[in-house]
């Protein structure tokens, strides 16, 4: 299905199941198919699952003028209101998590049941007071670090074969050229969403990966100590994509958490 946004751009999305809505949001350069291993377990558990390709990603409309993450935040808000989601749960991976952090700040009028961020620090630039950013990125060098992707392998041992096969299809159909999207990545990296995270009015689960090549998961403990609504779950034997690298552990942890809220 396709949803037309305020500027005429269209988001490709799908809805599976019935019940409590839960929206799954991919990251920078990603595709909604990254959530393949979550669909059946969530639907079986009684959730209505919504996935979508963000603007200028996957099967959604191209947008050469996309340079700010705030555009993606507003897109999510518009999509949820437009398709009539009531008190949804949001689960975002990487930049998709930052879209959620930003939504809490920019759209407090939207009622949410809970939010989940996957392997994404709310502040990507390191400082002496915040050593939990993206690799060794700082205000002085972040563009170079991000451009080179840290020269690191994103996953620990690769992703689940089923997810890999689904992604291979859409990557061929809708290739993502990283170099063309660096302005968006830079804008994403400059944000500091810690105030909105610490002030979250709804339950928040932060899922980190013990072998993440990008983030030290201790950032979640620091934030958890500042708000009792924040919970931290660490997934072992996983790089940046725990939902696709360790889907069984990820799904079990996510569902157990959702049953507590």
Image (cartoon, helix red, strand yellow):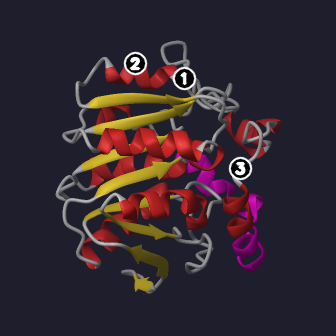
| Cα gap from disc 2 to disc 1, whole angstroms | 10 Å
Q: Residue at x 55, y 78 (%)?
A: 60
* Along the line of sight, the residue nearer the viewer: 254 or 77: 254
Residue lying at the far top in this picture: please name it: 128
* Along the line of sight, the residue nearer the viewer: 50 or 194: 50
Label 2 sits on residue = 222
| Cα gap from disc 3 to disc 2, whole angstroms | 29 Å
- In the rendering, at what x and y percent does residue 6 appear? 36, 81
- In the rendering, at what x and y percent does residue 242 appear? 59, 42
* Mark 1 / mark 3, whichever is N-terminal: 1
Q: Please, what is the dominant secondary structure of the magenta stretch?
A: helix
* Along the line of sight, the residue nearer the viewer: 137 or 22: 22
Disc number at residue 132?
Answer: 1
Span shown in magenta: 168-188
Q: Quadrant of residue 78?
A: bottom left
- In the rendering, at what x and y percent does residue 36 appear? 57, 62
């Amino acid at each position: 299905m396709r949803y037309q946004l305020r500027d005429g751009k269209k988001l490709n999305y799908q809805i599976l199941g019935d019940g409590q809505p839960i929206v799954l949001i991919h990251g920078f350069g990603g595709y909604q198919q990254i959530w393949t291993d979550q669909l059946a377990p969530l639907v079986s558990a009684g959730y209505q699952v919504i996935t979508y390709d963000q603007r200028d990603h996957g099967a959604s409309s191209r947008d050469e003028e996309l340079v700010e993450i705030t555009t993606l935040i507003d897109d999510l808000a518009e999509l949820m209101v437009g398709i009539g989601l009531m008190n949804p749960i949001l689960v975002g991976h990487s930049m998709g998590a930052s879209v959620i952090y930003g939504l809490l700040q920019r759209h407090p009028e939207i009622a949410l049941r809970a939010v989940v961020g996957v392997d994404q620090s709310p502040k990507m630039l390191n400082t002496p007071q915040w050593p939990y950013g993206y690799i060794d990125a700082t205000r002085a060098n972040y563009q170079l670090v991000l451009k080179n992707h840290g020269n690191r392998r994103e996953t620990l041992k690769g992703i689940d074969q089923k997810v890999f096969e689904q992604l291979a299809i859409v990557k061929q159909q809708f290739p993502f050229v990283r170099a063309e999207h660096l302005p968006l990545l830079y804008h994403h990296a400059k944000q500091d969403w810690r105030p909105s995270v610490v002030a979250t009015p709804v339950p928040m689960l932060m899922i980190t990966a013990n072998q993440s090549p990008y983030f030290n998961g201790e950032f979640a403990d620091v934030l958890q100590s500042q708000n009792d609504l924040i919970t931290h779950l660490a997934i072992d034997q996983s790089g940046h994509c725990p939902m696709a690298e360790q889907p069984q552990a990820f799904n079990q942890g996510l569902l157990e958490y959702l049953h507590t809220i």
